[in-house]
Structure formats: C-alpha cells, structure tokens
Amino acid sequence: MAVLVIADHDGSALRDTTHKTVTAAGQLGGDVDVLVVGQGAQGVADAAARIAGVRKVLLAEGAGLGKALAEAVEATVVPLAAGYDAVLAPATTDGKNYAPRIAAKLDVAPISDIVEVVAPDTFVRPIYAGNALETIQTSDAKKVITVRSTAFAAAGEGGSASVETVAGGEAPKTNFVGEEMVKSDRPELGAAKIVVSGGRALGSAEEFHAVMDPLADKLGAAVGASRAAVDAGYAPNDYQVGQTGKVVAPQLYIAIGISGAIQHLAGMKDSKVIVAINKDPDAPIFQVADYGLVADYKTAVPELMAALG
C-alpha cells in the first residue's frame, strides 16, 4: 500500500499538521510520500524530507500553485493518484477545500475529519458536534481522507527522504485575487501550545481585549473566543474556537466566561489541560475541565495575573 500526504505549509515553513497527518498515514500501512504544492517551496520540501517515516517527497511548483487553489491542487494530485491507494490531507481550511474536489475527480466518497485509523479501510470520525463517534468502512479502491490533526501525535524528525520534482497542475478558470491577513505577534491559534479564550460574559469588545490580551501576553498564548463572543463583535472571526471555528488541542486551554455549548466543546475538548473560570457552577464547561474555578472573571483574572508575577 502507498499513501500520499499533501503537505500543509505557509510557503516558507512546514506546519506540524503535516507531521500529524504523516502519523495517520503510517497507520494505514505501506509507504508514505509527501506532496508539497507551492511556489518557491524548496525549503518546505527539504523540511518534509526530514520527517521520520517518509519515503520520498514530491515537489510541484508553479506560479499558480502558491495559494493552494482547489482547482490547481486537484489538477496536480489526480495524475499522481494512480500510484497511490490513499490520499491524505490535514482537515484545515485548505484541506477541506481541495479534498472533496480530488475525491469527485477520482469518483470516490471523501472521508472527512478522521480521528482514528482502525484498519486500512476503516476509520473513526466525530459526528453531532463531537458528541458521538462513528466507525465507517469504505469499499473504494482509492481513499481520499482529511485528518483531524489534533487526534494524532506528530511524526518525529530524522528522516532522509529524497526530493523529486513533479509537474504542477493549472487552474485555467480560477485566479487568485487577494487576501487580507490578520497579523499578530502571538502564536497562531491552531498551533499554539497555550490558548486563552473568552466568552460572551466579558460583555464588550473593549472588555474582551482588556482582559484577554494581557493574560495572553503574560503566558505567551494565542487568544481564542467562543462563537457567541465572535457573533457579538467582541473578537474577530479568526479567533473562533469550535465546530464552526478552529479545532485546537493545546497543552493548556483557559476558558474565561465561556458556558461551554457543545459546538465550542467540539473545538477544544482534546486539549491536554483545560482550566475554566465561570461564575455559573452549572456551566457545561466544567464537565470537561480539569480545573474549574467558580468565580467572577473580574476577580479571578487579576488574581491570576498577580500570581503569574
């Protein structure tokens, strides 16, 4: 069996979601290759070659490949798919964009957001906002799978795979126009080891940032938010953690003023240590918290800041 992993990167650096997807690919059995699609991405390919367990790295470069347009990625992957039994990608915004298109072109059913590999044809994935897990078995000869990277450990370094150049595809009817990126000195939310999140209880955008920003700076953490806080305008959309936001699994997750709706829990309950601060003792967040403090954040957060020095 041979498995192709589509690398997740920002054009210059490989994200650890790729390492975690390689771990999932290795559990299918057989050889694992990594495809790097981009422009000026030789450094990314070299980094992928150092992942333990990778047989070889395929590098597809071109002017139209720099922004991972679904049409261009599909046109690159489909010709390569003849040599593989499965194509895996992290369940990121990009992966969720191009994986269904690849599956459609290969005439197979995509398998999304897996959290466990039971057998080469059997997988576990969450449903109902993570409140249930379903085990699915596919009879497709080729499999197109997206991987919830938070459910897998990252593959280590120490590999010495070769790097080969392959032809890149084109998206003749689609052009990249532009993007607006939020710039921050803090860690990226999806990859941060510490996340502090605020909820609607903070009351306003000014209060949200007055409470969350100093704490995040003190801990070297990323800032997240519940959907309720985002919908209320307290925080931008890219802060949202949950089923319809980002799925995170940091070493430490601190939830402040978040009740813990199931949609939010689906995005953070795999965190290694969860700390919840909420004045409602019956808040659902306490059901998943490792440490819970029933208190008003206006008192608890200043005390925490003082304790941190």
Image: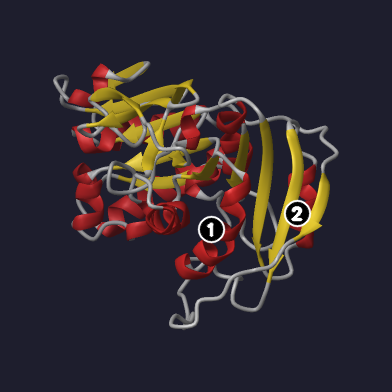
Residue 127 % position (x, y): 25, 32
Q: Amino acid at mark 1?
A: Val
* Residue drawn 53% across the image and 28% down it: 152
* Residue drawn 74% across the image and 69% down it: 40
* Residue drawn 55% across the image and 69% down it: 67
Residue 54 % position (x, y): 73, 37
Q: Is residue 84 left or right of residue 148?
A: right
Q: In the rendered image, which quarter contains the C terminus?
A: top right
Q: Amino acid at mark 2?
A: Ala
249, 231: nearer the viewer: 249
Residue bearing the label numbered 2: 45
7, 85: nearer the viewer: 85
Disc 2 residue crowd, few under 14, some 14–19, many 20+, Cα 10 Å: many
Q: Is residue 270 left or right of residue 279?
A: right
Q: Earlier in the sequence, mark 2 or mark 1?
A: 2
Whether residue 8 is visible, yes or no, is no
Residue 220 marker: none
Residue 27 % position (x, y): 57, 24
2, 124: nearer the viewer: 2
Q: In the rendered image, which quarter contains the N terminus?
A: top right
Q: Is residue 196 above or below residue 38?
A: above
Q: Is residue 164 left or right of residue 105?
A: right
Residue 78 marker: 1
Separation of disc 2 and disc 1 at Cα?
A: 20 Å
